[in-house]
Amino acid sequence: MKQGYAILGAIVVAGMLLLSGCIGSDGGGFVVNKVVEAQKNVKQYTFESETIYKVPGTEAAVTMPMNGKVDVENKKMYINISTAELIVELYLIGGEMYIKQAEQWIKMTKSDLEQGRSGMSGFEDLAKQYEKTVEILKSSQTKIDVVGEESVDGVVCYKVNVVPDAEKLKEQISKNSMVPGIETINVSLYTVYVDKATNFIKKEDANFDIDISVQGMKMKINGQMKFVYNGINKQIDIQLPEEPKTQHQ
């Protein structure tokens, strides 16, 4: 069962790190340094996303809706992931992670996460995802094109097309997501919507291909992903339910 969690965690974390603000220039009143500094001040937020994964040449496809809450200051996170065959709830409270599937709660300790035995240690980095993009943002190889303005949920945003530094992107995903055997990452579309008033990232869209080689087997995965961030720096409450507490007393 934990192997399945490892694969799921790897895919989700790879996607979230891919969609975490890889912007690298300025234009049209858009100033990248202001965006970088703004993301450092993100303390809490909620998000909604949908990702579609496909294996080229087959009909294999997975649609993965996901929503969650992140409290960076207090090191708390809640994520709900659902597919046609799988529903997973995840809480990260301090150094402990609780995962629920099929009415069963699994507890993972700080030691499990640090040693990567769970295969899910990359989830611990999700609360710091804005920080993880700083190196990509600084790269001279990352390019942007401010194509205009667009309203997202009533918020006026810069619409920015991004070509990220491929090597930096691969390095960050490989280091933080536990995705095995990444050979190449190709982002065919990456658009970021940045709130003009606050410089916070509001929405991100991406199409990408990842080539993976594990134990001599090669696989290509096509992905389409959308993230929408809400309630940035508004108070949120993340509390572990009583059920996992009683199961793991």
Image: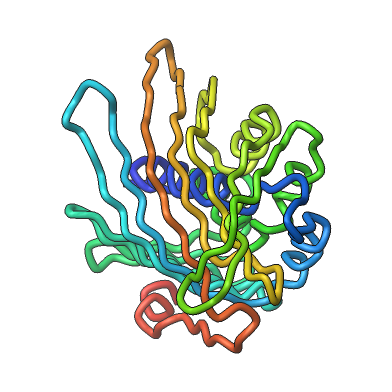
Instruction: Report the front residue among 223 and 193.
Output: 193
> At 51% from the left edge and 82% from the top edge, which residue is drawn?
238
Q: Quadrant of residue 52?
A: top left
Measured as percent of width and height from the top left, residue 117 is found at 53, 43
Q: How is the image coloured?
A: rainbow
Measured as percent of width and height from the top left, residue 162 is found at 61, 43
> At 40% from the left edge and 68% from the top edge, which residue is drawn?
67
When the figure is inspected, residue 164 is found, relative to residue 198, above or below; the finding is: above
Q: Quadrant of residue 116?
A: top right
Q: Quadrant of the C terminus?
A: bottom left
- The residue lying furthest to the top in this view is 216
When the figure is inspected, residue 56 is found, relative to residue 132, above or below; the finding is: above
Q: Is residue 82 left or right of residue 193?
A: left
Q: Is residue 216 left or right of residue 65?
A: right
When the figure is inspected, residue 234 is found, relative to residue 247, above or below; the finding is: below
Q: Quadrant of residue 90?
A: bottom left
> At 28% from the left edge and 24% from the top edge, which residue is drawn?
56
Measured as percent of width and height from the top left, residue 87 is found at 26, 61
When the figure is inspected, residue 166 is found, relative to residue 52, above or below; the finding is: above
Q: Is residue 234 left or right of residue 27?
A: left
Q: How many marks?
A: 0
Measured as percent of width and height from the top left, residue 42 is found at 70, 72
> At 53% from the left edge and 87% from the top edge, which residue is drawn?
237
